[in-house]
Amino acid sequence: MDWEPASQGKHGARRRSKRRGCLIAAVAVLLLVVVIAVVSRCSGGDEYGDLSWPTSGLATMLPEPPSDKGEVTIDSEDMFSATIGDVTDEEGTAYMDACEEKGFTVDVERDESRFEAYAESGERLVVTQYSEGELNIDLYAAVEMGPIAWPTAGPGALLPAPPSLTGHVNGDSSTRYSVTIGEMTQEQFVAYADACFAAGFSVDYSKGDTVFSADNGAGASVHITWDGGGMMSIGVDVDQQEAATTPEAQTDPAPESTPAPETPSTQTGVSADFKQTVDSYEAFFNEYADFMEEYSSSGNPASMALQYASMMAQYTDYMAKLSALDDGTLSADDYAYLMDAQVRINQRLAGIAG
């Protein structure tokens, strides 16, 4: 979920374009993984290729799987994902045991078909056993953290400082502040949510053991989640008009003879049209994920063929709309808003592919 705004100017725009293009392509690849995995389970397919287990990267943290049939679908610095075939329930259970013995012992959640846990170093592992003899493995890289200073200006200043200041700032702009905080307990998460409520984020609120979201009635909204592994994620958004009234850091006034130069781009904040496009894009993928879950568990997937075709047509339309956006007009806030949505979409699709 890390992003850093590219530098301004035409070269920065090119970097934003290239990176956003790669992320859109990643969604397309991940969507294909979802389709292949779900259709394979729905069709009862039992043929798998020979598995080539990596000898480097995240995969080295895992025990070797109990079968030499399957495929590695994602192998990057940020995530490793593999589907293993011809695995009995007993072998799947034994593999989950082996993962725990390998060090995935933090915040363990486990039942007969699913194992989820963190390593002490912060990596998150999800192993899912399916009745068709298929084992899915998803391993997410740890979030790099260090000491942070809580902001005294901008959207972040609207929230109280959390009890831990070890974390990773994902984005800080005039309209959005996003950070992952480490060295937390779930009890501290709940207490922090209460502190945000007391600080004025009490409009249209939703509060639970793992999530808190609310507005402050003055154009700002917050979304906080307990991620497990001692981590919580915080995102606070301020609409473009309200951004002008958020706290600003105190600085010495510039001399009248040396006014600040104008930057090539005058756009700041998330533009309304762009926000609407990204929001509808994310809403579609949430709808798509819901459909694929139903499609996967349906006893009669053929009856959903027309709806499936409709979903794929909508997917093509949304990808075309995103590709048509003019990268040169995107502000850092636009780009940050897209990156946050992209991370959530990737995580949702990766869960369905599992």
Image: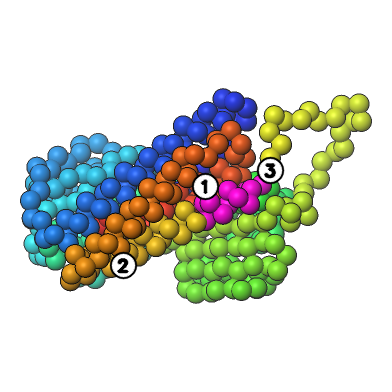
Q: Position of residue 11 (x, y in %)?
A: 56, 25
Judged by depth in the image, the label closer to the viewer, 1 or 2, is: 1
Relative side of 320 to 326, left or right: left
* Residue 330 % position (x, y): 59, 39
Q: What is the three-letter code of the residue carrying label 2?
A: Glu
Q: Nearest the camera: 4 or 30?
A: 30
Q: What is the quadrant of residue 7 in the picture? A: top right
Label 3, on which residue? 268
Q: Amino acid at mark 3?
A: Thr
Residue count near mark 2 (Cα–Cα under 10 Å), binned few <14, some 14–19, many ≥20: few
Q: Which secondary structure is most common in the magenta stretch?
A: helix
Q: Quadrant of residue 266?
A: top right
Question: Badge 1, how many Cα within 10 Å: few under 14, some, many 20+?
Answer: many
Start-end of magenta stretch: 268-279
Q: Earlier in the sequence, mark 1 or mark 2?
A: 2
Distance in Å between CA atoms under marks 1 and 3 = 15 Å
Image: 57 above or below 278: above
Residue 145 place in picture, x, y as percent:
49, 46
- Left or right of 149? Residue 250 is right
Earlier residue among tags 2 and 3: 2
